[in-house]
Every structure is written in C-alpha cells, then in structure tokens.
Amino acid sequence: MPEAVRVEPIAGALGAEIGGVNLAGDLSNSDFDAIHDAFLKHHVIFFRDQHDLTPEAHKSFGQRFGSLNVHPYVSGMDAHPEIMEIIKEPEEKLNFGGGWHSDMSFLEKPALGSILHAIEVPPFGGDTLFANQVAAYEALSDGMKAMLDGMVAIHSASREYSARGHSAQARKSMDAQVADDAPEYEHPVVRTHPETGRKALYVNPAFTLRFKDMTKRESRPLLNFLFEHSRDERFTCRFRWSDGAVAFWDNRCVWHYALNDYHGHRRHMRRVTVNGDRPA
C-alpha cells in the first residue's frame, strides 16, 4: 500500500477512514488501487476534509469505479444530473434516506456504490449508520442459509416513492416524483459479490416487497426476521459527519440509515451513485 494512504478501521463489523488522500486531485493508480482494496475489505470508507471536491471532481472520482447513475425519481443538479443534492432545511420534518435501505435495489441493475459528500452539516446529529450484509448472512444458521440460497425477492420503488412514501414527500429543496407504477424486479435473496465472491443478504425494508411466488402476507414473517437480523448492532458502524467529509459505501453488501435527529438545523449533502450489475 502507498505510504501516503492510511487506512484506519472505525469498527469491527465494517468501515474504515482513509487518510492521506485528496479526492479532488489526480489519484495515482497505486493510490486508487489502495482505496479500491479498502472499499472491498471494509465495505464503507470515509474521507475527511475534502473541501476542494467540486461537482466535476466528485463525478470524476465516481467514474473511476464505473458509469454514473441518474436517479429515475429524484432530480439532480441542473448542470450535473448525476449528482443528487440531499438537503434538509431547518423547518422541514422529514429527511431523505431516513430508514434502513440499499440504494437503488429497485433497479434491474442496482447501484454498485454511493459516494456522499458533506457540504453543510448540523452542529450535532445527522450521523449515518451502516450495516454489513456479508456478516449478517454469515451469522445465520446453516439451515437458514440453505433455505435462503436460491430464493428470489421482488424489489420495487412503488412503495417508497408512492404518494404516501417517505422518499416522494414534498421537500423545499428537493424534487422527487411519485412512482406508484414503478416496475418490479427479481433479485436473489442471497447475492454473491461480483468482486470478492462473498455471499451477502440482499433484501431491505425500503424496496423489498415480497418473495417470488409468495404473497406479501406469506412473505412478511421471514422478511421481518431478516430485516431485524440484518440491522443487529454487531453488524453496524456509525459515522459522525463533518464539513467536507465523504462516505463511499458498497450497496451490494451494505445497508445504511440517515438519522433524523437535528431538527432546526440545515444539512446539505451531494451524492453520486455508481451503476452496478444484475445481482447473481
């Protein structure tokens, strides 16, 4: 690993802070390889004091990992549609991302990862929680693993982005569309990470509706068990934001949850999402 790049784990389950890196600069191949290795090993990585990360540089860093997504239901920046501005004004009650989920699992080819840059953070609160779905899968009994392997779940944005859905609610500084008729896609309940080969649970409370060939009522007991299991504290880490900080998480094996505990204060983040492949 290059001497300039420092990797310091922040928790036993997942998460590492990366030092000695300026994401707005020209990353050498060796620095990029070190970041990529840390990303695969720790599942979510953090960078402090990235104040020079312009929208152009933000996109450029994301493009090192793949093509960038334009969100189908939330408008991006006018000049940079690939960048979603996630803003909560002091008088607003609802935040965006305020529940456990995996970004974009409602797509046929869900996101590889998300890169979130803090532009303005509240004086307290607004932390983000992350949960390791590789660890969640590995902690299951052999019998449960055997049952889940080969099962398929149905994912859709129809609930979260419905007229009553949390993500589609009107916000002063964000433009989200209602998508009651959003398509449904089938994904394996246990997916194999395309780069590491490790198995991870791949269901989440926001976008997983039911199991294939089962009703919602039939699916609910097992889904509820998996949702509760997957967010167990032993699989989690917590990140305290600061102005200029960046978090990059692997949506193929990580859940996250943006805490909404800073009422009366403003929070402004910018997110780039890297396109992924079809889960297998």
Image: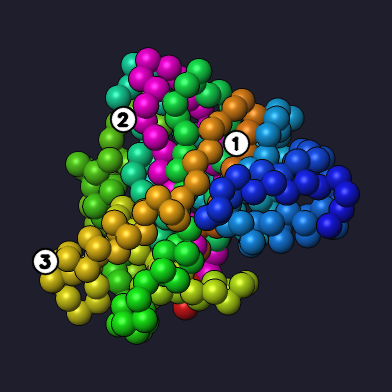
Label 3 Cα crowd, 10 Å radius (few <14 / some 14-19 / many 20+):
few
Which residue in the protein does label 1 denote?
Answer: 117
- Tell me where the magenta segment starts and ends, as one range: 253-277
Q: Please give the name of the residue rendered at 87% of the width and 53% of the height, measured from the top-left corner.
A: 2
**Circle 2 sits on which residue?**
94
What label does residue 217 carry, if any? 3
Residue 45 spot, x, y in % from top left: 63, 48
Residue 187 in sight in this render = no
Instruction: Work out whether mark 1 precedes mark 2 in sequence or the reverse, and give the earlier one.
Output: 2
Is residue 273 covered in magenta?
A: yes
Q: Mark 2 is on which residue type?
A: Leu
For the residues labelled 3 and 2, the Cα–Cα distance comes to 28 Å
For the residue marked with disc 3, what is the amino acid? Answer: Arg
Residue 40 appears left or right of 107? right
Quadrant of the rendered structure where residue 22 is?
A: top right
C-alpha gap between disc 3 and disc 1: 39 Å
Q: Residue at x 43, y 54 (%)?
A: 234
Q: Is residue 61 above or below residue 173?
A: below
**At numbered mark 3, what does the secondary structure look like: helix, strand or loop?**
helix
**Separation of marks 1 and 2 at Cα, in angstroms:** 20 Å
SS state under label 2? loop
Q: Residues within 10 Å of mark 1 (few under 14, many from 20)?
A: many
Is 105 or 250 nearer to us in this picture?
250
User: Could you say where residue 266 lies in the image, as x and y percent from the top left?
Assistant: 45, 20
- Disc 1 residue type (three-letter): His
- Is residue 47 within the magenta segment? no
